[in-house]
Amino acid sequence: MMHEPTSDALPAQARKALKNTKLQSVLEAVGQLFPLVRQAAVEKLPEFDALRDVAAQIKDHTFANLDFYLEAFEEKVERFGGHVHWARTAEEARQIVYTICKQEKARKVIKGKSMITEEIDLNAYLEDHDLEVVETDLGEYIIQLRGERPSHIIGPALHLTQKQISETFVEKHEALDPTRSMEDPQDLLNEAREILRKHFFTADIGITGANMLVAETGSAVVVSNEGNGGLSMTMPKTHIVVTSLDKIVPTLNDAATILRLLARSATGQELTTYSTFITGPKRAEDTDGPENFHVVLLDNGRSNMIGTEFQDVLRCIRCSACLNHCPVYTSIGGHAYGWVYPGPIGAALTPQLLGLKQARHLPNASTFCGKCEEVCPMRIPLTKMMRYWREKEFERHLTPGTTRFGLGAWAFLARNPRLYRLLSACAAWVLKKAAGRKGRLVHLPLAGGWTNARDMPAPEGKTFLNLWQDQKKDAAP
Ligand code: SF4
């Protein structure tokens, strides 16, 4: 059954996640480990920042000439015997994939990890059409068994503890001895490997995403740490790459530049274990490879972003650095965001893909600390994007009445500085009195969200402006 987005319920989902102690322990580790390994990898590459500039320029140049590079890619794929299918919408992409499966009389599909197939909810669609779909990335396989969706872009099952995964394997792998040892993570890995191996040999179709598409050669670039991507491409008779048009880069050199940033930003590796460049179906001289090669190129509203204030978000290479450094993501996890792309990248991209009505909470779920854009390898101005969406939310009257009133009142006061100074001085004085000798406010009218979780320190009793003026007077000769 297809999944419905629940991004409009982010506040309630976030509250639930904050109470989930297992999730909180996992998120704490995510927020500590990933930034450390990224930092260590970045420090070993002095030209890291220069590479970020070059990578952003590569993508900007590509978007300025998008039609040219996409057509060049299509021409190369077809020259090597493959096929390119253009899909304007998620529905078109799903139908194209299903039509290929029908043509091939397929019964079983194996998949490498792909966020675009999550975006179009492909597994559910194919299963609704009586195809067996098996995820072969370990994290994706685990959440498929549990009927869940990914909570992290590069670690789909990061929200789970080892114990939860062991319980899932015991429950779902019914043919195996339920008393077998599941203590060691290696036991889990071996079991998944054993089961997946059979599927690699019996699948009719392999579906993968693509981290990049190279216009110069017609190649799809797929990176993975498990080798399942390579097997999903080469073992079945037909390989379908389901990807989006923003993945295109002009040359192999450009792809290599971006690969140097990707793994360092994602997992702190110099390069991902497997970086596969696949170009068309198997040739006569090849020892392995698919007989049929298809690329489904999804737009899904992305071309509308070209030339707008949202274009920069298309530079994203889904490394997850912004998630791993985000104080909001590392507090509430990915599922609270209610759809495929969580964290700062989700806040910038999801409103475009799902509409602002469904996704309006996402750009507001930010402290604006700016850490996300500080670490983004593609120099995407994520906080600026979130601010744009907040403006659009206000313009379209989607902002709640109380917030609109508050912003309107603040705007009025900001235009009347004397009144602003008078009222803020009164408020500071009243709050100081209310805090009493404890110096902390336990309840604050209209700001219960703050005081529910922590006390508010009492103001000085003077405004910042008063204090500053006092200081100037004291400093005067
Ligand atoms: S926005 Fe930047 S940091 Fe976040 S996933 Fe995309 S490339 Fe990585």
Image: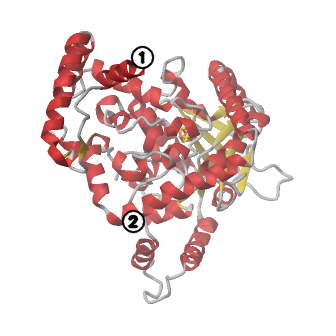
In front of the other: label 2 or label 1?
A: 1
Cβ(mark 2) to ligand 1 < 8 Å? no
Q: Quadrant of the C terminus?
A: top left
Task: Determine the image quadrant of residue 273.
Answer: bottom right
Front position in the image: 353 or 45: 45
Residue located beneath label 2 in the image: 146
Residue located beneath label 1 in the image: 476
Front position in the image: 103 or 44: 44
| Residue at screen point 42% across, 21% down | 475
Q: Amino acid at mark 2?
A: Arg
State left or right for residue 356 relative to residue 405: right
Distance in Å between CA atoms under marks 2 and 1: 69 Å
Question: Residue 23: x, y in percent?
Answer: 38, 62
As helix, strand or loop, the secondary structure at mark 2 comes to: helix
- The 10 Å Cα crowd at callout 1, few under 14, some 14 to 19, many 20 or more, is few
Question: Residue 38: x, y in percent?
Answer: 62, 50
Question: Residue 361: x, y in percent?
Answer: 31, 36
Front position in the image: 272 or 138: 272
